[in-house]
Amino acid sequence: MLNKGEFMTSQLNKIADYWNQRSFGYSLDNQEELLHDQEKWIELINRYLKINKGMKVLDLGCGPGFFSVMLTNYGCQVIGIDYSDKMLEEARNNAGKFKANVEFQKMDVQNLAFQDETFDLVITRNVTWNLEKPVQAYKEILRVLKNKGHLLNVDGNHYYHYQDRDYNRSGHSDHQHMEGIDVSIIDNIAKELKLSYVLRPQYDIKILKEIGFQQIESEILSKEKTKEGKELIRQFLIHAIK
């Protein structure tokens, strides 16, 4: 029988194994964004903080390196971390293609190997939903941010249909390059994850206040309405300042 620590490691490895399989197709998505969508994302980020040359940035769960490459090319000093070896391989390839000098490291985002108050900005997208210990991850983010440092988290209620059937949707239609991957693997993992059963960003905002972030705001980036008029939050942004 696995003890708690072994279970956590086992789940982390299962999650990483899935993203290893998804890395090539996800990288194709990121490459298309780097070619066509950088301006849109820079405009969104600049609504919440000014991107300055030399700003120290942690791209948390960097995947194939979209934010890492983009922000490096805008003059930031970026470290991208991920627990998936294949994602990191794709990230390094993309940094080379787009001429971005980025440092990438393999790391569990729930246990950061950085000193306190290292970064001006921690940015993350589509990561926190698939963490076993999201509260611990948020505490680690708070720890490594400098005083008055910023967190930008873009995420969604991707698996809230396990709690609320109105959130059902047709598979993984948001991604163009699924490359025949068996998505039932991550669907089953998500059944065991805390953030599949809480409505966000409300839950995150409550946690961020409790652990000590001073200023917190959110924006709904994508939403739908049911026939009955119920609003479904699909994608959101959370901005918090230490």
Image (cartoon, rainbow, N blue to C red):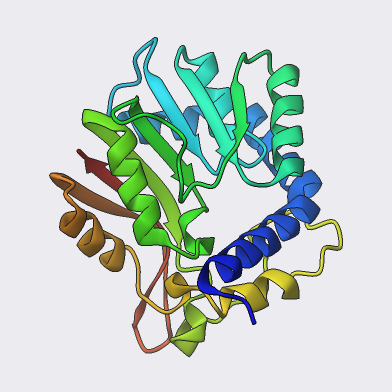
Q: Residue furthest right?
A: 180
Q: Is residue 137 above or below residue 39?
A: below
Viewer-proximal residue among 159 and 61: 61
Viewer-proximal residue among 235 and 118: 118
Residue that appears at 47% across and 35% down? 113
Viewer-proximal residue among 238 and 148: 148
Q: Residue 85: in sight, yes or no? A: yes
Where is residue 98 drawn, in percent x and y?
69, 18
Where is residue 157 drawn, in percent x and y?
45, 68
Viewer-proximal residue among 165 and 203: 203
Where is residue 165 drawn, in percent x and y?
49, 89
Residue that appears at 59% across and 71% down? 7
Q: Residue 170: in sight, yes or no? A: no
Residue that appears at 16% across and 49% down? 212
Q: Quadrant of the C terminus?
A: top left
Q: How many marks?
A: 0
Where is residue 219 drawn, in percent x and y?
30, 52
Residue that appears at 76% across and 51% down? 20
Q: Is residue 132 above or below residue 221?
A: below
User: Is 48 displayed left or right of 96 in the figure?
Assistant: left
Quadrant position of residue 199: bottom left
Q: Quadrant of the N terminus?
A: bottom right
